[in-house]
Amino acid sequence: MNISIIIAHPLRSSFNHAIGKTLVESINQQAHSVRCHDLYEENFPPALPPQEVPRGAPLPDMVQTHCRELAEADGIIVIHPNWWGMPPAIMKGWIDRVFRPGIAYEFIEGDSGEGIPKGLLKAQFALVLNTSNTTPEREEKEFGDPLETLWKNCIFGLCGVPVFRRRTFSIMVASTKGQRADWLDEARNLAAHLISEK
């Protein structure tokens, strides 16, 4: 299987990067192909320029690589912190530039864009792993868990990915070394389970 991992956290010492490193090592041991991108390390430019908006527009090499890998992925793993109920801006820009018509979705013939698009991604699962300093209960009660809606419904569901899982690790600021070790094991097991089912 081709597994694509996308990480968005500015600090290499973050738990987000620890998750990414753990999953890359674990998936490689299972003899799967892993493509891992650290958006901050790559300095991925998040702003969508006007010339890239049309379908089929020429793309810079970096964006084209991400588009190709997204289209080829059998499984997609996204790792980022919860910032104000949203991903970091660099990841939102990655979504804008990479989840393109003709790559991630398309409108059916005769639909000028007002209908429901058809998902094009071949990935059989998406796993989103978040870190947060808000409890899941408060996130749901007070804010409606916007990250769940964004990733499950607005992105992966719309783009045709049939299986979606998400896990938030919190509260990070008060977590112990033992908790973080347990969370890494949980992330490893979540990914292994999704991969083994496909």
Image: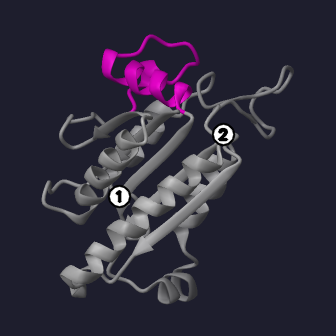
**Residue at point 34% right, 16% down?**
60
Q: Classify 178 as above or below 126.
A: below
Residue 82 seen in render:
no
Q: Earlier in the sequence, mark 1 or mark 2?
A: 1
**In this view, 38 is above or below 131:** above
Say few, some or many: other residues with alpha carbon within 10 Å of mark 1 (under 14 / 14 to 19 / 20 or more).
many
Residue 81 placement (x, y as % from top left): 33, 64
Q: Tell me the number on the disc at residue 80.
A: 1
Give the alpha-carbon distance from disc 1 to disc 2, as whole Å. Answer: 20 Å
Q: With 135 as the anchor, is 166 left or right in this view?
A: right
| SS of the residue under disc 2 | loop
Secondary structure state at the residue bearing disc 1: strand
The number of discs equals 2
The image quarter containing residue 75 is top right
The amino acid at mark 2 is Cys
Position of residue 101 measured from the top left corner of the image (x, y, whole percent): 61, 26
Q: Which mark is residue 159?
A: 2
Q: Is residue 149 left or right of residue 13?
A: right
Residue 174, disc: none
Residue at position x 48%, y 89% from top? 138
| Observer-nearest of 132 and 46 | 132
Residue 59 on the magenta segment:
yes
- Image quadrant of residue 24? top left
What is the three-letter code of the residue carrying label 1? His
Residue 151: % across, % down = 56, 55
Residue 85 in sight here: yes
Residue stretch rendered in magenta on the structure: 47-73
Name which residue lies at 24% across and 82% down.
178
